[in-house]
Image (spheres, rainbow, N blue to C red):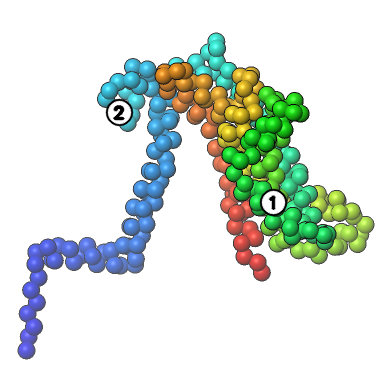
């Protein structure tokens, strides 16, 4: 007995499309690309809007009709930020560089020594000290800025870049130490033991054997320590009030005067501030990926 199949016009039209999606997981790939596109657009749109706003003229900025693309490109805001008579952006940008670079170098130096000691040496309270590092890193800055302000004020380090570097070390050193600890554990201890048998000291083993092998983790720590210090806002806001000692993130607040918002100059300054971390990530992208995945699986 023959079976008669009835199909609607919509079923005839959708069958080839469903077959195309079912072939070689094309449906999953298409859904994945759509999700990635939406997530990418969601992430990139604020940066695009910042960049587009920095190139808009004042007439375009304050018009009631909002356009995604600037009607006319102008570099006036960048000129005012960089060469304006009353602009402090150049000084504040250099201050941020000094603080971030000093914090990065000191954090890597102390983090390498601390991570090596907690990984390779046996001493009383080693496990407890390792746990304290995590607690110190996870402690929110909102409960630490008042004690830090009192300490910096008593030591005469308020309104100074040195005081700001010391404040930033409170979160960058625990982070660097904890991350380098995880990487040091993956390195074969036999290499250090061979060097110690040949007469090398612990210091020589650390700086001439361990750290060269841990270069990806060191680069990751440097990138993140620099980024954390560069973007830090709360400690810089509390500890520094002098305009010539402010860092660039704090300087962005100077483009809000009363109820007036200088959006063009603010977005131009924010774009310039985002260039160093972006360049650092582009330069160290390969090492950052290696450093994040290294130590995840132990043989």
Quarter of the image with the C terminus is bottom right
Residue at label 1?
Answer: 133
For residue 185, above or below residue 212: below
Q: Are marks 1 and 2 in contact (CB under 8 Å)?
A: no
Taking the image as shown, residue 53 lies to the left or right of residue 178, namely: left
Residue depicted at x 53% and y 13%: 84
Q: Secondary structure at mark 2?
A: loop
Q: Quadrant of residue 63?
A: top left
Toward the viewer: 166 or 15?
Answer: 166
Between circles 1 and 2, the one closer to the viewer is: 1
Taking the image as shown, residue 206 lies to the left or right of residue 150, namely: right
Residue depicted at x 7% and y 74%: 6
Mark 2 crowd level (few <14, some 14–19, many ≥20, 10 Å Cα): few
Toward the viewer: 141 or 249?
Answer: 141
In space, the residues marked 1 and 2 are separated at their CA atoms by 49 Å
- Residue 266 x, y percent position in the rendering: 47, 24
Residue depicted at x 38% and y 43%: 41
- Residue 135 x, y percent position in the rendering: 65, 51
Residue 181 seen anywhere in this rendered image of the structure = no
Taking the image as shown, residue 288 lies to the left or right of residue 61, namely: right
Residue at label 2?
Answer: 67
Q: Which mark is residue 62?
A: none
Q: Quadrant of residue 202?
A: bottom right
Taking the image as shown, residue 93 lies to the left or right of residue 206, namely: left
- Residue at the top extreme, as displayed: 85
- Which label's residue is closer to the chain start, 1 or 2? 2
- Residue 73 x, y percent position in the rendering: 38, 21
């Amino acid at each position: 007995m023959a079976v008669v199949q009835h199909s609607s016009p919509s079923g005839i039209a959708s069958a080839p499309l469903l077959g195309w999606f079912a072939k070689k997981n094309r449906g999953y790939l298409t859904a994945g690309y759509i999700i990635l596109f939406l997530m990418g657009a969601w992430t990139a749109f604020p940066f695009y809007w910042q960049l587009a706003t920095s190139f808009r003229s004042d007439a375009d900025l304050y018009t009631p009709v909002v356009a995604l693309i600037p009607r006319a490109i102008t570099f006036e805001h960048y000129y005012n930020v960089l060469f304006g008579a009353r602009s402090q952006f150049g000084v504040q940008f250099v201050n941020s560089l000094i603080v971030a670079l000093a914090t990065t170098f000191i954090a890597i130096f102390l983090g390498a020594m601390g991570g090596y000691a907690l990984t390779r040496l046996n001493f009383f309270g080693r496990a407890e000290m390792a746990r304290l590092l995590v607690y110190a890193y996870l402690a929110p800055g909102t409960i630490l800025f008042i004690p830090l302000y009192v300490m910096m004020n008593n030591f005469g380090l308020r309104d100074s870049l040195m005081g700001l570097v010391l404040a930033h070390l409170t979160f960058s050193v625990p982070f660097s130490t904890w991350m380098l600890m995880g990487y040091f554990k993956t390195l074969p201890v036999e290499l250090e033991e061979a060097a110690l048998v040949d007469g090398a000291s612990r210091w020589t083993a650390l700086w001439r054997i361990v750290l060269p092998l841990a270069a990806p983790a060191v680069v990751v720590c440097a990138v993140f320590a620099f980024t954390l210090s560069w973007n830090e806002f709360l400690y810089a806001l509390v500890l520094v009030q002098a305009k010539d000692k402010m860092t660039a993130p704090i300087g962005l607040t100077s483009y809000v005067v009363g109820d007036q918002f200088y959006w063009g100059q603010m977005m131009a300054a924010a774009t310039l501030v985002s260039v160093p971390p972006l360049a650092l990530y582009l330069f160290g992208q390969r090492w950052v990926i290696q450093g994040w995945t290294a130590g995840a699986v132990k043989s």
